[in-house]
Image (cartoon, grey):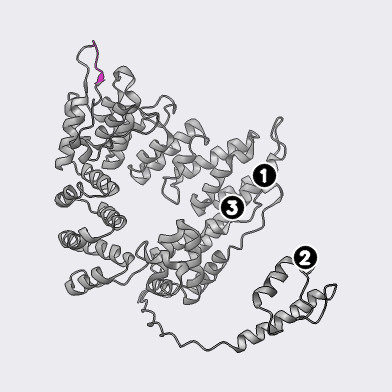
């Protein structure tokens, strides 16, 4: 027995004793029906022999104790709910892929984490492994999960390679020194993990923007390209004219992505030198048409992309199927301050400029560039002008390039105005075109928007519409409707009469979907109650 290599036993087991006869001189049984048992006996004996020969390894150094977390403890009911959400104990799916009337717990976890973080709770230590596992599996959870996990979650992540993502993304509740403690700030900046350094830069920037830039300059040339990009991206919050000299320097960075981000940030500063350069290029390409009888816009796209344009962030090579000149024009107009256009068009307001006809089929390209500029510069007046009235048919509105563009423009508007616009859009055009627009509305949905969605679903239900076409909107409603709407929705849970020509089984599906919606809203209300404000002191 002792002469049989372990590898031989493994190979025989994998192939099977029928295909590879055991060695009768080594194992007690010859090939046949007793061979499998003899093989297992040999493996058992060999395992004991191998374990007996192991030498104990030297003890590893004990890890440093976990740092304290001074946040208030999570209430017990909320802790039990978190365990349930992390365990993903959703109801089983029904036949045919139907979800049934049971709430989907996986969709509630992001909201649970966001609410817990708003109240500033700390998690029970026992749930930290499951919390980190959930964040590893779902990138949409990571920011909220790491914030909730706090300093102990980051400490634990250092002990398991599977959780190394936590060391490079988000603050993770890092305990930071006071921004005015220069020695501690310098030490953490020089020695900290990437997540700690990003969080530190943001904290120092909020306290003293000049000191944050000095900190970044001190190691900029030695940072990796991907880290330089992340540090640069963190300057979006609190971006000001004081950042211009540093960003101008970054235009010459060896990384293309860093250069592009620096140019984008500079173009968001309407008084920057780059914005002025782009404005000069843009007004030379776009202006009033002086040849016709009425007011119009004429466009002359750039004929080349010179070195100066490239340094300012204009990408010279157009994507496949795109003309070079239109590609350059879009980038130039996108980066130009929107404030230049009223003066260029005789003092007209944004909505008047957008309404002007554009010569030679340049309208789509020009409006798309203005859309991107409005989003980049967070200009609500231009966003309103490009969106147009919600009742305007989508194919004929000012910005007709895509619903994605409309979604980005809506994100510029205040939350209440955004919800009102989408509610008007749904009332005029229904839910089919509105799904992408709903995703940018604040949660929970404002009352007019929630009512518009429910009314549209009710109309589709009464018309016997194909119910599975609205499953995406119903899923959004479960996450975004105000939980207070549950009582009003009870009437819709009844099994409706199916009109002639309705999809077979549609009534049952609608009833089931509304029962799930009501149950989910009530569960969200329970979660909100369990995660009430932390007690003072």
- Residues tagged 2 and 1 counted as in contact (Cβ below 8 A): no
Between discs 2 and 1, the one toward the N terminus: 2
Mark 2 lies on residue: 19
Question: Which stretch appears magenta?
Answer: 292-298
Left or right of 391, for residue 384: left
Picture coordinates of residue 455, whole percent (x, y): 54, 39
Q: Residues within 10 Å of mark 3 (few under 14, many from 20)?
A: many
Instruction: Depth check: give the residue in front, 13 or 115.
Output: 13
Picture quarter with the C terminus: bottom left
The quarter of the image holding the N terminus is bottom right
**Which residue occupies the extreme front position in the image?**
25
80 vs 262, nearest the viewer? 262
Q: Earlier in the sequence, mark 3 or mark 2?
A: 2
Q: Which residue is outermost to the right?
A: 33
Q: Tag 3, which secondary structure?
A: helix
> Where is mark 3, residue-wise?
518
- How crowded is the residue under tag 2: few (<14 C-alpha within 10 Å), some, or many (20+)? few
Residue at numbered disc 1:
509
Q: CA distance from mark 2 to mark 1?
A: 54 Å
Label 3, label 2: how far apart the Cα atoms are: 60 Å
Q: Do the numbered discs 3 and 2 sit on residues whose CB atoms are within 8 Å?
A: no
Where residue 311 sits, quadrant-wise, is top left
Q: Give how far across and how far down residue 122 sits, in percent.
A: 42, 72
């Amino acid at each position: 027995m002792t002469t049989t290599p372990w590898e031989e036993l493994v190979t025989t087991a994998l192939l099977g004793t029928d295909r590879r006869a055991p060695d009768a001189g080594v194992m007690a049984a010859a090939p046949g029906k007793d061979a499998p048992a003899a093989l297992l006996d040999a493996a058992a004996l060999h395992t004991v022999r191998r374990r007996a020969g192991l030498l104990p390894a030297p003890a590893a150094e004990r890890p440093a104790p976990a740092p304290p977390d001074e946040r208030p403890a999570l209430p017990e009911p909320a802790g039990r709910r978190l365990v349930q959400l992390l365990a993903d104990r959703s109801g089983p799916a029904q036949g045919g892929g139907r979800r049934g009337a049971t709430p989907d717990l996986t969709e509630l976890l992001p909201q649970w984490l966001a609410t817990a973080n708003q109240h500033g709770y700390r998690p029970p230590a026992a749930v930290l492994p499951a919390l980190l596992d959930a964040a590893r599996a779902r990138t949409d959870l990571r920011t909220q999960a790491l914030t909730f996990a706090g300093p102990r979650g980051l400490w634990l992540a250092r002990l398991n390679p599977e959780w190394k993502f936590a060391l490079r993304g988000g603050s993770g509740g890092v305990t930071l020194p006071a921004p005015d403690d220069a020695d501690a700030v310098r030490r953490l900046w020089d020695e900290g993990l990437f997540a700690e350094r990003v969080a530190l830069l943001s904290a120092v920037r909020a306290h003293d923007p000049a000191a944050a830039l000095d900190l970044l300059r001190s190691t900029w040339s030695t940072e990796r390209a991907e880290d330089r990009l992340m540090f640069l991206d963190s300057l979006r919050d609190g971006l000001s004219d004081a950042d211009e000299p540093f960003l101008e320097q970054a235009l010459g960075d060896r990384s293309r992505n860093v250069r592009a981000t620096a140019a984008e940030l500079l173009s968001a500063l309407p008084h920057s030198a780059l914005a002025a350069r782009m404005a000069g290029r843009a007004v030379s390409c776009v202006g009033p048409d002086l040849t016709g009888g009425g007011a119009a816009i004429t466009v002359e796209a750039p004929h080349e992309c010179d070195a100066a344009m490239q340094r300012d962030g204009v990408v010279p090579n157009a994507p496949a199927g795109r003309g070079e000149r239109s590609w350059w024009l879009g980038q130039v107009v996108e980066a130009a301050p929107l404030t230049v256009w009223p003066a260029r068009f005789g003092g007209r307001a944004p909505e008047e400029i957008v309404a002007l006809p554009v010569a030679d089929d340049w309208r789509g390209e020009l409006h798309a560039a203005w859309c991107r500029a409005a989003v980049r510069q967070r200009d609500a007046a231009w966003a309103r002008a490009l969106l147009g009235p919600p009742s305007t048919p989508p194919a004929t509105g000012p910005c007709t390039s895509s619903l994605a563009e409309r979604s980005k423009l809506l994100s510029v508007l205040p939350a209440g105005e955004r919800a009102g616009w989408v509610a008007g859009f749904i009332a005029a055009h229904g839910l089919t075109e509105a799904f992408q627009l709903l995703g940018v509305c604040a949660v929970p949905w404002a009352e007019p928007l929630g009512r518009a969605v429910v009314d549209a679903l009710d109309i589709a239900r009464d018309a016997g519409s194909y119910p599975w076409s609205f499953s995406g909107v119903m899923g959004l409603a479960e996450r975004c409707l105000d939980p207070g709407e549950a009582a009003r929705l009870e009437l819709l849970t009844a099994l409706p009469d199916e009109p002639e020509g309705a999809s077979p089984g549609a009534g049952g599906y609608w009833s089931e979907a509304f029962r799930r919606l009501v149950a989910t809203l009530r569960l969200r209300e329970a979660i909100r109650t369990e995660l009430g404000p932390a007690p003072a002191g």
